[in-house]
Image (cartoon, grey):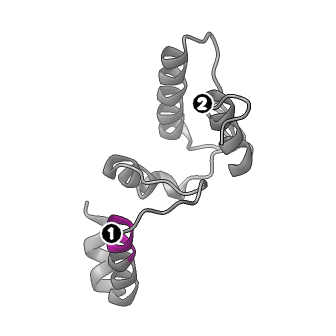
Amino acid sequence: MDLLTNLKIVDPEIQKAIDQELSRQREKLEMIASENIVSTAVMQAQGSILTNKYAEGYPGKRYYGGCEYVDIVEQLAIDRAKKLFGAEYANVQPHSGAQANTAVYFALLQPGDT
């Protein structure tokens, strides 16, 4: 399913703005720490049907039903994080964007880095 093909038909003005943003990102280097360039695979996952599902809680222990496939995706992320970091446990749910950024900073930076 090509999600952007439908957008071109339904709202060409929005599609044009998205295309322009893509060009801007390809042509310019953004020096804002909170921005990132993700792979096409990440954009496809974030633009997938999973966006429609509210999944509060943890895999297998959600507060709402119908989360079995979200649970699969999150469990894959947990398992991959545990393997990557050699950890017994992992939580891949950031409480907030700021906390997610801080976790990355602590993992990659040393005191005094700028």
Q: How many marks?
A: 2
Front residue of 109/56: it is 109
Q: Residues within 10 Å of mark 1 (few under 14, many from 20)?
A: few
Which quadrant is home to the C terminus?
Answer: top right
Which of the labelled discs sits on residue 27, or is there none? Answer: 1
Circle nearer the N terminus (1, 2): 1
Whether residue 25 is situated above or below residue 77 in the rendered picture: below
Residue at mark 2: 108
Whether residue 87 is situated above or below residue 106 in the rendered picture: above
Q: Is residue 60 visible?
A: no
Q: Residue at 58% of width from left, 60% of height from top?
A: 32
- In space, the residues marked 1 and 2 are separated at their CA atoms by 27 Å
Q: Which residues are magenta?
A: 21-27
The x and y percentages for residue 46 are 45, 53
Callout 1 touching callout 2 (CB < 8 Å) = no
The x and y percentages for residue 13 are 37, 89
What amino acid type should be assigned to the residue bearing mark 1? Glu
